[in-house]
């Protein structure tokens, strides 16, 4: 893909256009650290309530914060975040993001309005930067205007939700998320600009961050003295997280990034990026967040049975990650991973055991299923895996 030339006019330059092959910048990685706090706050909210409503609240908040992060992933494929006013605007957005993250535990209560306003600042900064970047690109400007409308609706509904409560508040939140996230489905995507390698790397980094939250959950959950049960659960949790890492990064991420890079620039490439990265990475990240909730509860007392909610978080979160990967592969590579689909269904079926086995045993079952899946794929497709990872990609 050939990147457009830098925009330099009579006006002061506020950005530099990204170029093919350019790596993720330090400021982008710094920006991602704010998402770490947001993710931690979401898992804390879900674990603290320990109810189906608590899980729903956590997923709704995570969805909103995810969409904020996604906007900046698209933005930094157009502008260099370390240039001039863009850098300052990124810092402003980070500050607002931190405030929104701090408000997560009270996002449906006392801090609802502050969360909504902080979220609005994050999104407005994003739109303003896109407006500046698109001043000499009519197609991009058209797409930005459409995005601004859905952003305004989503942020406005969050402000409205702050003055409601109970079921009505959850409904308004759900509508806000659907309309905000759904905006790019009705806006013409042809005007967007991405650098495929950079865009894929950005999403890979956020998967790493989410997996880090599952590792942190091990330490948070093991707040008592370390005994054999805690050690066993910690090892199983680490192996389970490693399996999720392997499932994404070993082959899938590499092949998907290549498919994205080889797609025709413009509408086709942007649709793949929107569907497979912006949309389908959300259930992956949400699945890892749910897994972290389940791990916290498991490490709290490995000898007792998990309740149905934390058991669902543990097994359902892992299944969500796999199902999202099935959809991801289907969208990008047009192939169905039957093994991962069956593994996800097996995890959901294992939920029926939550009341009759210990938390440690349930974690062991989940880990064994993932290890078996990874081992089978590594052995059965060893030659194909070697070609993907170690041989040069044939020219299209």
Image (cartoon, rainbow, N blue to C red):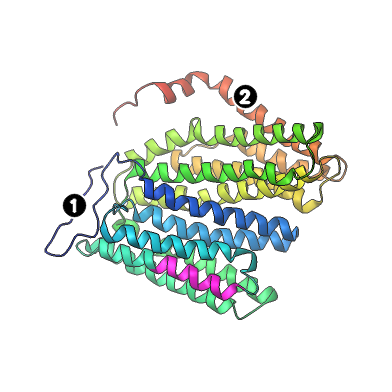
- Residue 275 can be seen, yes or no: no
Q: Is residue 214 above or below residue 339?
A: below
Q: Is residue 382 above or below residue 70?
A: above
The quadrant in which residue 366 appears is top right
Q: Residue at x 71, y 33 (%)?
A: 236
Which secondary structure, mark 1? Answer: loop
Q: Position of residue 381 (x, y in %)?
A: 53, 22
Q: What type of secondary structure mainly makes up the magenta span?
A: helix
Which secondary structure, mark 2? Answer: helix
Q: CA distance from mark 1 to mark 2?
A: 47 Å
Q: Which mark is residue 6?
A: 1
Residue 98 located within the stretch drawn in magenta? no
Q: Which residues are magenta?
A: 111-124
Quadrant of the frame with the N terminus: top left
Residue identified by numbered label 2: 375
Q: Which mark is residue 76?
A: none
Q: Residue at x 60, y 64 (%)?
A: 104
Q: Relative to residue 92, is residue 181 drawn left or right?
A: right
- Going from N to C along the chain, the mark reached first, 1 or 2, is 1
Q: Position of residue 332 (x, y in %)?
A: 44, 42
Q: Relative to residue 212, is residue 268 drawn left or right?
A: left
The residue mark sitting in front, 1 or 2, is 1
Q: Nearer the viewer, residue 267 or 249?
A: 249
Q: Residues within 10 Å of mark 1 (few under 14, many from 20)?
A: few
Q: Spot the residue most to the right.
A: 356
Q: Is residue 381 above or below residue 336?
A: above
Q: Residue at x 68, y 42 (%)?
A: 219
């Amino acid at each position: 893909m050939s990147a457009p030339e830098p925009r330099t006019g009579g006006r002061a330059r506020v950005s530099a256009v990204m170029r093919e092959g350019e790596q993720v910048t330090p400021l982008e990685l710094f920006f991602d650290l704010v998402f770490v706090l947001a993710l931690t706050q979401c898992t804390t909210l879900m674990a603290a309530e320990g109810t189906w409503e608590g899980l729903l609240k956590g997923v709704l908040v995570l969805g909103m914060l995810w969409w904020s992060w996604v906007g900046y992933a698209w933005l930094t494929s157009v502008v260099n975040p370390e240039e001039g006013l863009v850098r300052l605007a990124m810092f402003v957005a980070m500050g607002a993001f931190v405030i929104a993250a701090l408000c997560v535990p009270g996002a449906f209560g006392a801090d609802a309005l502050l969360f909504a306003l902080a979220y609005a600042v994050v999104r407005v900064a994003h739109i303003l930067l896109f407006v500046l970047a698109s001043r000499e690109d009519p197609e991009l400007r058209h797409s930005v205007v459409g995005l601004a409308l859905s952003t305004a609706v989503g942020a406005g509904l969050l402000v409205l939700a702050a003055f409601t409560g109970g079921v009505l508040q959850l409904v308004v939140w759900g509508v806000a998320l659907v309309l905000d996230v759904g905006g790019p489905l009705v806006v013409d995507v042809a005007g967007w600009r991405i650098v495929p390698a950079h865009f894929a790397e950005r999403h890979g980094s956020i998967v790493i961050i989410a997996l880090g939250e599952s590792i942190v959950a091990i330490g948070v959950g093991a707040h008592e003295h370390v005994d054999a049960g805690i050690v066993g659960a910690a090892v199983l949790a680490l192996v389970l997280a490693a399996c999720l890492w392997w499932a994404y990064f070993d082959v899938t991420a590499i092949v998907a990034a290549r498919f994205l890079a080889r797609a025709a620039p413009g509408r086709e490439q942007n649709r793949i990026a929107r569907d497979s990265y912006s949309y389908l990475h959300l259930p992956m990240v949400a699945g890892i967040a749910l897994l972290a909730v389940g791990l916290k509860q498991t490490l709290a007392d490995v000898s007792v049975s998990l309740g149905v909610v934390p058991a669902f978080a543990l097994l359902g979160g892992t299944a969500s990650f796999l199902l999202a990967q099935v959809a991801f592969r289907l969208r990008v590579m047009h192939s169905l991973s039957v093994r991962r689909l069956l593994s996800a269904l097996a995890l959901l079926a294992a939920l029926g055991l939550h009341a009759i086995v210990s938390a440690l045993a349930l974690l062991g079952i989940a880990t064994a299923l993932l290890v078996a899946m990874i081992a089978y794929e590594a052995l059965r497709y060893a030659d194909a895996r070697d070609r993907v990872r170690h041989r040069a990609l044939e020219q299209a």
